[in-house]
């Protein structure tokens, strides 16, 4: 906690997300948070904020003494180096997703958090969505019984060729470290482990540049196996339109579906496991109740995480998304890619060092030539999450 009434925040990286965060702060949407400095290597981005102190490098902002906290919204690889620098400088730190590109770098970043007085958070804004919060509470309360199967089709992350051409770092092994799994799906992978825990084995098919002129994955189908025998299927792509976002959970109390902002619960009157053993005929199914579980809105999303980060610093509020938990979504993404690269199932915990070596070999042996970067309007991000 801090005795100050406001937190002086520096944003490192003024791309689409950095600008969105900066604008929300300047519009007063985050009580107690002041935009005290910004940093970006592109001077044109800095010019949009004439009244805010500016730095060309993130490390300069970190060492300037002008901020209490930083939000790191740079390309992915810099999340690790700048996050370590910020923590070592004694700054509260909020890192955009993913917290690092691979598990080994996550471990390095997390190890740098030595002072428990520093607030260290991750931008997992979908943890504020009431639908996913409700599913998590239903599972933790035991209302659903044991989970038997999870299916998540999350194919509404549609992106155009213009999107990938809008930055030289995008969709390359060396610049981003992956595609849909490292850029869009950290949110869903985080929710997957946050709600259901970590699987013990992953088998994945990843298609590289199926829909776009990129070298990384833009279509993924993964099979998950859990320690209790539950299974899951996770399907995602940036190449389908309009796409689908449907989470289906089969459990001992029936079936739960999250889709189109609604939760539908087909609840069995009797536990399925009990009915299976006690039914006196061969083909009867358990009776069910069809329940629509009420939810409203999509939560405060990015602003909710920023408010929580600020309140954690000022008042000791519990974090919604501690940065240390960010390693799990990275490990899931790494394991899916590792499985596809090696054409084999991958047991978890993942060997982070082995994956880091494999990723480095992809970078060193890449023959991909990035198309000429096109000018692109600053995106309206309101429909991207």
Image (cartoon, rainbow, N blue to C red):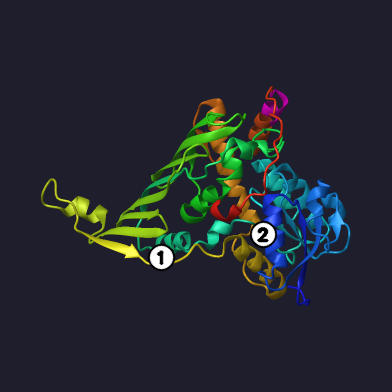
Question: Residue 123, how many percent across, how many down?
Answer: 63, 56
- Report crowding for label 2: few under 14, some 14 to 19, many 20 or more residues within 10 A (C-alpha): many
Task: Tell me what residue is drawn at x 73 percent, y 66 percent.
Answer: 26
Give me the disc on residue 349. none
Dot 1 falls on a residue whose secondary structure is helix
Task: Tell me what residue is drawn at x 51 percent, y 36 percent.
Answer: 239
Q: Which residue is mark 2?
A: 121
Q: Which residue is mark 1?
A: 141
Determine which quarter of the picture holds residue 173.
top right
Is residue 373 or residue 12 the one in the foreground? 373
For the N terminus, the image quarter is bottom right
Q: Which residues are magenta?
A: 360-366
Whether residue 96 is visible, yes or no, is: yes
Q: Is residue 137 left or right of residue 59?
A: left
- Dot 1 or dot 2: first in sequence order is 2
- Report crowding for label 1: few under 14, some 14 to 19, many 20 or more residues within 10 A (C-alpha): few
Whether residue 178 is visible, yes or no, is: no
């Amino acid at each position: 906690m801090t005795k100050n009434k406001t937190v002086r925040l520096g944003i490192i990286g003024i791309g689409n997300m950095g600008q969105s965060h900066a604008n929300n702060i300047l519009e007063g949407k985050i009580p107690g948070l002041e935009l005290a400095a910004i940093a970006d290597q592109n001077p044109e981005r800095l010019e949009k904020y004439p009244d805010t102190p500016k730095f060309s490098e993130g490390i300069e902002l970190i060492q300037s003494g002008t901020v209490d906290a930083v939000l790191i919204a740079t390309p992915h690889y810099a999340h690790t180096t700048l996050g370590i620098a910020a923590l070592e400088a004694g700054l509260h730190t909020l890192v955009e997703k993913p917290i690092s590109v691979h598990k080994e770098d996550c471990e390095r970043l997390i190890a740098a958090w030595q002072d428990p007085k520093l607030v260290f958070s991750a931008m997992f804004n979908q943890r504020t969505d009431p639908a996913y919060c409700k599913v998590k509470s239903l599972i933790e309360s035991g209302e659903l019984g044991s989970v038997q199967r999870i299916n998540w089709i999350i194919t509404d992350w549609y992106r155009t060729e213009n999107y990938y051409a809008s930055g030289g770092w995008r969709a390359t092994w060396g610049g981003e470290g992956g595609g849909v799994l490292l850029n869009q799906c950290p949110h869903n992978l985080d929710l997957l482990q946050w709600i259901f825990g970590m699987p013990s084995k992953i088998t994945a098919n990843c298609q590289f540049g199926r829909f776009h002129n990129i070298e990384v994955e833009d279509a993924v189908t993964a099979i998950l196996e859990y320690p209790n025998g539950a299974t899951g299927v996770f399907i995602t792509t940036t190449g389908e339109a309009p796409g689908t976002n449907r989470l289906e959970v089969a459990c001992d109390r029936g079936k739960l579906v999250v889709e189109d902002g609604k939760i539908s619960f087909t609840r069995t009157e009797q536990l399925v496991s009990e009915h299976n053993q006690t039914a006196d005929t061969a083909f009867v199914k358990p009776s069910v109740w069809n329940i629509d579980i009420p939810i409203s809105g999509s939560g405060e999303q990015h602003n909710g995480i920023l408010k929580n980060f600020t309140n954690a610093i000022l008042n000791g509020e519990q974090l919604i998304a501690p940065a240390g938990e960010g390693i799990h979504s990275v490990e899931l993404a790494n394991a899916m890619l590792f499985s596809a690269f090696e054409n084999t199932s991958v047991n978890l915990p993942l060997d982070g060092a082995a994956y880091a070596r494999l990723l480095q070999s992809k970078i060193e042996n890449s023959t991909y030539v990035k198309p000429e970067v096109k000018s692109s309007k600053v995106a309206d991000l309101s429909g991207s999450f």
